[in-house]
Amino acid sequence: MSTPISRRIFLALGASVVVAACSKSDGGGSGDDGSGDTTPSTTPSTTPTTSTPLAPAPFDVDPFTLGVASGDPSTNSVIIWTRLAPDPLNGGGIAEEEVPVRWEVATDIEFTDIVSSGDVVATARHGHSIHVEVAPPAGAVAYYRFRVGEFTSPVGATRVAPDSSSLDTVRIATASCQNYTAGYYTAYDDMVKQSPDLVVFLGDYIYEGGVGTLGADTVRLHNSEEITDLVAYRNRYALYRSDPLLRNAHAACPWVVTWDDHEVENNYAGLTPQDAVDADGYAARRAAAYQAWWEHMPVRLDPPVDENLSIHRRVTWGGLVNMLVLDGRQYRDDQACGDAVLQVSPACEEASVPERTMLGAQQEAWVAENIESDAVWSVLANQTVMTDIRLGAAVLNYDQWDGYAPARDRLMESVSSADNLVVLTGDIHLAGVGQLTSSIEPTTARGVEFVTTSISSSGNIDSSTEALLVALPNIIDAEVAHRGYTLHTIDATSWTADYRIVDDALVEGSAVTTWKTFAVTAGSPTVTAI
Ligand code: FE
Ligand code: CA
């Protein structure tokens, strides 16, 4: 039994077994239906396949400047990624349409035991990026690398997800918002030292803005004016990946990545730009941004063919985690009430129009169909704050779920029968813990939201307002002054979230400590500090 395989990305060379990275079989963006031991959507390579010599490289400079990455593990396979870019900040620097690349997977870091290998073709059409689905042995860390001519990439570590019989503890790091100009990536250095099994990135991987717009708190500069075309988006991803701490974090373990707004531009909604004056050509800009995102992320997704790219998908981990990775940007209605921020007057009528959507009808239905599982924890990897923090009739930030309250109520009702709901969120550049509710029964706890602070992007709420934030009934706690990430330790009876914060992200190598640790006990929809 097999499902259709897209072979658009990869071309087999000679007798090598090469498989497509992805297909779409579940209505979401992923070929993996996440159901554990069912038939995989593609047939991974399992045997050593290459003995032919490598062709000479068509360049004389190391093309592996952007490092390596892996992601979207299923129980059968994982995607490994690289992009050839001998001149990373200037479009990549490869004139050839096609460059053959060898990939190798081994059980040891010295590659004395190569368990599979193959050749793929990197094409100019996709920025000479490659995404390969590989199937290392289950239950252990595996190592991968790429080779072109005499050049060999750095080594990455990865693994497939355990199957549904496993209740072994998993450690997942959540991260978001890494404005390169606003701070150093010290949080990633600490994250790698903590050796999580999986990193979940919740959006704002790049920022689209110009060279340096943060005044005195600019620690380093962007490489161009505001980015609007494919080459500029590629160059911006390359700049971010020039940071060795970010490259190391990608090489350390598989990632699951979703996007928020800044991968295209601030606070865009669907095909509506932030500013109406930018509407002309916006679909083409978004298409360029989506393609560059796909080219640089280790995702189990087909490349975009038009201005759309379906990325919502399911990732499971053993019998513990059933995670739905959401896209809260591509299908949302425009922000209500002129996208006002920090207004305490009652919301305009538009905000309560029931048809307004954050996820779009198709994704809403997909969540309802896929959130229930046999896993202990039902998880949403989400962009904007879902906890209800409205002040009476006032919405403090129309870009968050508060600005889409009827859609949030629909979502809360559609997931109400799922076990142990945990929502993982980024975007807002503060550390927070929220109690999820529905306005249909506002006093009933539905689950817990863990909002990770930004990796580097500057805080957008003044420290003096922290006490006001914490006083909101659904905010369990918050810390607005520090950058960092959250490390989640998950087993069959508890979910523990360590909030790791960087003392000063404006200083390289600053100390990283735990702000607070929060715990949820399976069976209870509430959270406590421990
Ligand atoms: Fe952000
Ligand atoms: Ca954002």
Image (tube, rainbow, N blue to C red):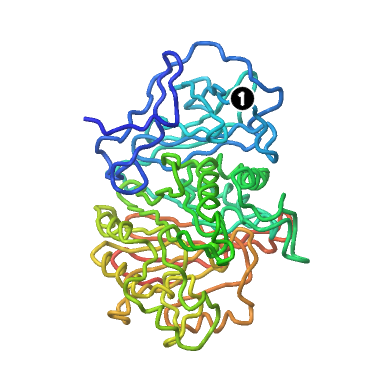
Please state which of residues 182 and 410 is positioned toward the viewer in this rendering.
Answer: 410
Which residue is drawn at the image coordinates 49% and 41% (left, top)? 298
Report the side of 82 relative to 22 (left or right). right
Point out the quarter of the image occupied by ligand 1.
bottom right
Measuring from the top left, give residue 304's x and y in whole percent: 45, 43
Mark 1: amino acid = Glu
Which residue is drawn at the image coordinates 32% and 53% (left, top)? 322
Please state which of residues 448 and 62 is positioned toward the viewer in this rendering.
Answer: 62
Q: Is residue 222 above or below residue 93?
A: below
Measuring from the top left, give residue 399's x and y in whole percent: 49, 70
Q: Residue furthest right?
A: 216
Q: Residue furthest top?
A: 52
- Residue 499 visible from this viewpoint: no
Q: Is mark 1 within 8 Å of ligand 1?
A: no
Which residue is drawn at the image coordinates 56% and 69% (left, top)? 430
Measuring from the top left, give residue 73's x and y in whole percent: 40, 41
